[in-house]
Image (cartoon, rainbow, N blue to C red):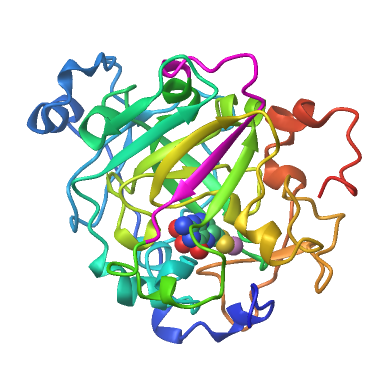
């Protein structure tokens, strides 16, 4: 059985190594939003530069985010790489499996149950979830625990916007996320590689942090299935596996949830999973990373940054904690 094979990434076929396909276009944003019927969402008229998508899926533009740390000024990873080099074990364990197999996922209709320690639990349809807050574009690094990273222009809003609608009680110390596990749509769920459904958790203050993103799109379009359609988390300062895809349930809980990865290998994947170059994975160093799309023979690995580069924004959440113990 393979858990995050460490040298997996060296097998990227040359065909995936593409040049940058980014067009920083200034769009007639209101026209686009109007066509989508999004103008009633309280979007500001301060139209910002958007990242144009490849025109493959339905448009989902976002205004440029003003959240601190939400716009990494690094070259974007090409759409082709973002959508063809994935971890989504419900569709297989190879990086190419999700792009090949995820066409059987049906992201519409979709709903999410919000329950547990909150005053207003309920089931929310995707159309309502899309309208909880204005869509923002946020350029985040995503670093996998395996030692590769990407820079992706996500579209979504702070998870806190959704969570506060449910009015969590004082007992809501953690938030547990459960994702779809349907054998009919997801061939990988027939394998025992993980204990399905995929479950992840955050402490309530991590979940409420403005950088924690409920993402519905990337590159100005709705999420491709292989990236976790129709909605996924993106927690940019934590290893990629915390960013649960295709979420169906959000539960406020008093006790720390047990994630699927912790169940699979407790000594390798702790609850916090903050990106930390000084804490090695038991089987490999976490000091450096390979940026997908920079895989030439002479491409250097990049040094991994504390909290994936978001220390200024999130370091305070962990003040006084021993991050070697709380890995
Ligand atoms: N449901 C689900 N979510 C998941 C995973 C998964 O296997 N299943 N893999 C995680 C891991 S290990 C990573 S690195 C990121 C990868 O996101 P991406 O493929 O969109 O880049 O998704 C995370 N979310
Ligand atoms: Mo990962």
Residue at the spot x=88%, y=34% of the render? Answer: 321
Give yes or no for residue 38 being in the magenta stretch.
no
Question: x and y percent of residue 126 in the render?
Answer: 25, 37
Task: Residue 57: tell me if it is visible.
Answer: yes
Residue in view at x 14 percent, y 33 percent: 32
- Quarter of the view holding residue 124: top left
Q: Position of residue 182 (x, y in %)?
A: 34, 63
Magenta extent: 164-181
Q: Quadrant of residue 97?
A: bottom left
Is-magenta flag for residue 167?
yes
Q: Is residue 45 left or right of residue 255?
A: left
In front of the other: 40 or 193: 193
311 shown above or below 85: above
Q: Does the image show residue 18?
A: no
| Quadrant in which the N terminus is drawn | bottom right
Residue 143 in the figure: left or right of residue 159: right
Figure check: 211 above or below 54:
above
From the top left corner, tell me how far across and down residue 165 is, in percent: 41, 17
Q: Residue furthest left?
A: 35
Image point 61% across, 81% down: which residue? 8
Q: Position of residue 247 (x, y in %)?
A: 41, 46
Which residue lies at the image location 69% right of the left edge and 47% below the top edge? Answer: 308
Above or below for 254 versus 99: above
Count up the numbered dots.
Answer: 0
Nearest to the observer: residue 105 or residue 184: 184
């Amino acid at each position: 059985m393979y858990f995050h094979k460490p040298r997996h990434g060296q097998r990227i076929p040359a065909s995936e190594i593409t040049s940058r396909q980014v067009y920083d276009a200034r769009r007639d944003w209101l026209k686009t939003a109007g066509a989508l019927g999004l103008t009633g969402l309280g979007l500001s008229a301060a139209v910002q530069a958007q990242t144009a998508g490849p025109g493959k899926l339905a448009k989902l533009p976002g205004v440029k985010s003003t959240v601190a740390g939400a716009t990494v000024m690094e070259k974007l990873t090409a759409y082709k790489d973002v959508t063809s080099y994935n971890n989504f074990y419900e569709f297989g364990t190879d990086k190419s499996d999700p792009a090949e197999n995820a066409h059987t996922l049906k992201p519409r209709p979709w709903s999410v149950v919000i329950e547990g320690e909150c005053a207003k639990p309920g089931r929310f349809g995707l159309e309502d979830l899309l309208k909880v807050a204005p869509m923002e574009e946020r350029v985040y690094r995503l670093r996998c625990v395996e030692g590769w990273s990407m820079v992706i222009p996500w579209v979504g809003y702070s998870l806190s916007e959704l969570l506060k609608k449910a009015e969590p009680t004082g007992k809501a110390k953690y938030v547990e996320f459960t994702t779809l596990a349907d054998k009919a749509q997801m061939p990988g769920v027939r394998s025992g590689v993980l204990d399905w459904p995929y479950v992840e958790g955050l402490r309530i203050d991590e979940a409420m942090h403005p950088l924690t993103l409920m993402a519905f799109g990337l590159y100005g379009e709705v999420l491709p299935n292989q990236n976790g359609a129709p909605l996924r988390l993106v927690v940019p300062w934590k290893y990629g596996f915390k960013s649960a895809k295709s979420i169906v349930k959000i539960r406020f809980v008093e006790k720390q949830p047990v994630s699927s990865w912790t169940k699979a290998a407790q000594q390798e994947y702790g609850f916090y999973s903050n990106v930390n170059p000084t804490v090695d994975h038991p089987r490999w160093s976490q000091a450096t990373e390979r940026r997908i799309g920079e895989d030439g023979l002479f491409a250097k690995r990049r040094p991994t940054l504390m909290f994936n580069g978001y220390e200024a924004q999130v370091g305070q959440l962990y003040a006084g904690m021993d991050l070697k113990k709380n890995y």
